[in-house]
Image: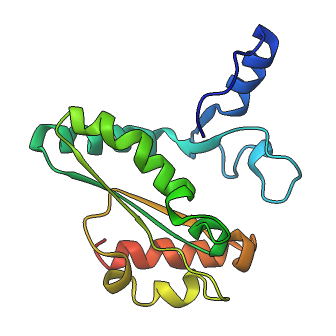
């Protein structure tokens, strides 16, 4: 986090490619792009989403701007996501808040970030069952990051997101 030294053009180009966000059309593609497959070695890109999801995210931010409302980002995950072994303020969600909150505030939007990750063997399986009570409501972006304790089995993330939808989060 922060700004590093200026990079030569080739290294800068590699950095841009590494953090590129891909948009996937789920009408024609049913799996994540190959560079994003879990445990396939080094992840070579920044992330992926669907085109529909990206458009809806833009709409949610615009809605928060027009209504001077909150924009809520919630993270449920394991000890690594919670930032254990570091200061809580240095976890990646709190760093996200530190960087993005001032920009949204200039547009009249209050950014609310909730890093509700926990360690000690508790994962999102246990916390998903009490979703609304633990994670709250009015969530605009919900992030699952429990790969360290719950592995790459999609059923855990599926339970987490389904409970989020069912709870009205």
Residue farthest to the left?
67
- The image shows residue 131 at horizontal and vertical percentages of 39, 82
Between 97 and 140, the residue placed more toward the observer is 97
Between 89 and 117, the one lying in front of the other is 89
Q: Quadrant of residue 86?
A: bottom right
> Quadrant where the N terminus lies?
top right
Q: Is 126 or 117 nearer to us in this picture?
A: 117
The correct choice, above or below, for 17 with respect to 38 in the image is above
Left or right: residue 28 compared with residue 66: right
Looking at the rendering, which quadrant does residue 17 occupy?
Answer: top right
Q: In the drawing, does residue 152 fall left or right of residue 58?
A: right
Residue occupying the point 76% across, 9% down = 9
Q: Is residue 160 above or below residue 14?
A: below
Relative image position of residue 71 (x, y in whole percent): 27, 52
Question: From this viewpoint, which residue is outermost toward the top?
Answer: 9
The C terminus sits in image quarter: bottom left
Residue at 57 percent across and 64 percent down: it is: 87
Q: Residue furthest front?
A: 87
Protein image colouring = rainbow
Residue 106 left/right relative to 88: left
Q: Is residue 81 above or below residue 159?
A: above
Residue displayed at 78% across by 22% down: 14
Residue 136: x and y, percent?
30, 75
Q: Quadrant of residue 74?
A: bottom left
Q: Position of residue 168 (x, y in %)?
A: 28, 74
| Number of callouts | 0
The answer to whether 93 appears left or right of 110 in the picture is right
């Amino acid at each position: 986090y922060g700004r590093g030294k200026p990079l030569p053009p080739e290294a800068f180009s590699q950095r841009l490619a590494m953090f590129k966000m891909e948009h996937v059309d789920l009408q024609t593609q049913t799996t994540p792009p190959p560079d994003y497959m879990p445990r396939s070695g080094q992840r070579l890109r920044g992330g992926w989403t669907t085109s529909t999801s990206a458009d809806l995210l833009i709409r949610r931010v615009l809605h928060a701007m027009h209504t001077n409302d909150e924009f809520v980002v919630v993270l449920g995950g394991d000890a690594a996501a919670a930032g254990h072994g570091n200061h809580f303020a240095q976890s990646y969600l709190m760093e996200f808040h530190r960087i993005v909150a001032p920009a949204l505030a200039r547009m009249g939007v209050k950014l609310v970030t909730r890093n509700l990750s926990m360690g000690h063997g508790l994962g999102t399986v246990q916390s998903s069952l009490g979703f609304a009570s633990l994670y709250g409501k009015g969530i605009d972006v919900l992030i699952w990051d429990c790969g360290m304790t719950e592995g790459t089995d999609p059923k855990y993330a599926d339970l987490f997101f389904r409970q989020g939808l069912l709870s009205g989060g």
